[in-house]
Amino acid sequence: MTVALALPTRRVEEWKYSDLARALGDVGFGDDSAEVLAGPVPAGVEVFALDEPNRPDWVKAHYGKLSANVVSAISLAKARGGIALRIPKGKIIEDPVTLDFAGKGHVRALLVLEEGAALTLFERCDAAETRNAGLEIVVAPNARLDHVRISPVSGVVQVEEVSITLARDAFYHGHFANFGARLSRIELAITLDGEGAEAHLSGVSVLSGDAHADVTTHVTHAVGRTLSTQLFKKVVGGNGQAVYQGKVTVAHGADGADSRQTAKALLLGMRAEADLKPELEIFADDVKCAHGAAVGDLDSDSLFYLRARGIPEKEARHLLIHAFLEDALTDVTNADLREQVRGAVSTALDQVAT
Amino acid sequence: MLDIKNLHVTVAGKEILRGLNLRVDAGQVHAIMGPNGSGKSTLSYVLAGRAGYEITEGSMTYNGENLAALPPEQRAAKGVFLAMQYPVEIPGVTTMMFLKSALNAQRRGRGESEMDAIGILKTVRKKAAALNISEDMLKRALNVGFSGGEKKRLEILQMSLFEPKLAILDETDSGLDIDALRLVAEGVNSLRAPERAMLVITHYQRLLDYIVPDRIHVLANGRIVAEGGKELALELEAKGYEQIVKDAA
Ligand SMILES: Nc1ncnc2c1ncn2[C@@H]1O[C@H](COP(=O)(O)OP(=O)(O)OP(=O)(O)O)[C@@H](O)[C@H]1O
Ligand SMILES: [Mg+2]
C-alpha cells in the first residue's frame, strides 16, 4: 500500500499561515527518526520502546488509531522509534514525568492513562534539529492528565501533532509555551468522547526576530455535557508571526456542550504579525459557545498610570506585558512547571524589543 | 513650589487651557473649582506628564525646574503625585505588587536604596487599615472590579505611601460616601506639612469643610477667572459658576 505523503501547501486552509514546504526546502523532513526519552519513570508505569518487536496488547490497541493530520500521518509512516507509556488503572503519579524529544526526523509517542489514573506530563523539545513529532494520548474514564509543553526558540522546523481522546469524566489540562522557530507548529486534535469530559487548553507565545509559532486546535465535542476552554496569549515583536487557529466542533446530538475560547495578541513592532482565527462549527442544540480574539498594542492609559507612579517606561512596558500573559501563566497547575514556564517567558521577553 | 505662567495647552488639536496662571507655595493647600469641561483634569494631566497634551505657550515650574522637560516617572520621583479622577484598571498586576514596584521605582529615581518587601508590606498594611482598605483588595488586580469609592481610597493610600511634595487630587471626593470622605480628608490633612503643597480639584464645598484650603481658584474656559479665600466656595455654592464667571468678566 502506498500512502500519499505530500507536504501540505499554503493552499490548504489549515496551513495558510504556515508554509511548511517552503520552510523545509528541498530536503523536506527526510527519512530520519528522531528520539524521545521518558524520565523518571515511577514504579508501576509501563514503558515500551516502539522499535522493539512484540508490541503488547495495549500498544496494539491504541497506537496509530487516533485521527491524524497529514504531517502526523507522515511521522506514523516513517518513524521507526518512539515510546509508549501506560499508567495503569487507578495509579496516581504525583511528580511530573518528562518526555524529552531530541534529534532529527520523525518520532512518535503514545500515552495511555487507564481508568482513574492521574499524571503530570512535562514535554521538552531540543531546539537544534528539524523534527516532526506525533503524540497520541488516550485518557480513560475518570483519568486526569496535566500536560505542559515548552518549546524553546529554534532556528529550524518543529512540528508536533497531539491527538487526544477523552472518555467519560476524563480530564485534560494542557499548557503550551512556544517561543517560535523558523516554522513551529503545535496542532491539538482533541475529542471529548464521554459525558463529563473536560479539556482545558492554554498557552503563551513570546516571539522576536523572525520567529514563527502556530498553535492550531481542533476540539470536538462528540457527546453532550462536555466542557472545553481555551486561553492563548501571544506577545510578538520584531518580524515575528503568531498564529492561532482554533476550531470547535459540536457534533450532532452533543447537547449541553460548553466551549469557550479566547486568543489575544500583543504586537510590539511595526512588522510583527498575529493571525488569530477562532471558529465554531455547531451541529447540536442548546450549546454554550463563546469565542473571542483581539490583537492590540499596550494600553496607553495603563502605561501612563504606571509612569505617573514613578515606574520608568521600559519597566512599565515589561510589567504590562507580563500582566497581559498572567492569566494564561497562572493556568499551569503544577507549581514547579509554572515557574519553569515563567522563567522561559522572562528570558524570551528580554529578547523582545519593547 | 509650583509656578504656572500663561499656560496654553492643546489636546487633539483643541486649545483647552488658555493662559492659565497659578502659584502654589510650599505648605499651602489650594483648591480648584470650575464647571465641567473647564480644563481641570487637563491641568492635572499636563502637570503629571500624560502624552497628547501639547504646551503651545507659557511655562510650568516646579521647585525652579521646568516640569515639561521631565518624563512622568521623573516627576513622580521628584515628588509630583496625581490622584486621578478615573484611576486605571490593570488586570494581571496585583495591587500590592504595584505599590511595591512604584515605591521602589521612585526611590531608585531619587538615588535612594530600595525598601525591602517586608518593610513595604508592613507600611502598606498600616496605612491601608487607616483608610479601611482590606487585605483582600491589596491582593486583587490593580483597581479591577474596585468600586468607585475603593479606587479613590486606593489613590489616597498611594499618596500616603509615596509622601509626595506636590499632591494633586482630581475629584478624589467624587463617589465617596460620607465616612470615606472623612477618611480621605484625614489622610490628606495628616500629610499637610510645611514642605508639602496640595492642589485639590473638587466640585463640592463639602470637601473643603474637611480640607480647609488656603486659597480657592475658579477655572473656567481654560483660565483662572476668580480667586479667593475659603469663603469663595460658599459664594460659589450660593450663586453658581455662571454668575461668578460673569462677575469676574
Ligand atoms: N483627548 C481629548 N480629545 C478631545 N477633547 C478632549 C480630550 N481630553 C479632554 N478634552 C476636552 O477638554 C475639555 C476639558 O476637559 P477636562 O477633562 O479637563 O475638564 P474638567 O474640568 O476636568 O471637567 P469635569 O469637571 O467634568 O471633570 C473638555 O471639553 C473635553 O471634552
Ligand atoms: Mg475632570
Image (cartoon, grey):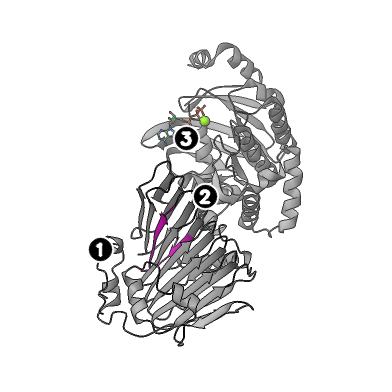
Does B26 sit left or right of B34 as displayed? Answer: right
Dot 3 amino acid type = Leu
- Residue at 53% in and 48% down: B72
Q: Position of residue B180 (x, y in %)?
A: 69, 30
Q: Nearer the viewer, residue A82 or B204?
A: A82
Say whether marks 2 and 1 touch (CB < 8 Å).
Answer: no
- Residue at 54% in and 46% down: B90
Q: Position of residue A193 (x, y in %)?
A: 46, 58
| Residue on which disc 2 sits | B70
Q: Nearer the viewer, residue A90 or B245?
A: A90
Q: Is residue A150 visible?
A: yes
Specify the quadrant that holds the N terminus of chain A: bottom left
Dot 1 amino acid type = Val
**C-alpha span from label 1 to label 3:** 61 Å
**C-alpha span from label 2 to label 3:** 17 Å
Q: Residues within 10 Å of mark 1 (few under 14, many from 20)?
A: few
Label 1 in the same subunit as label 3: no
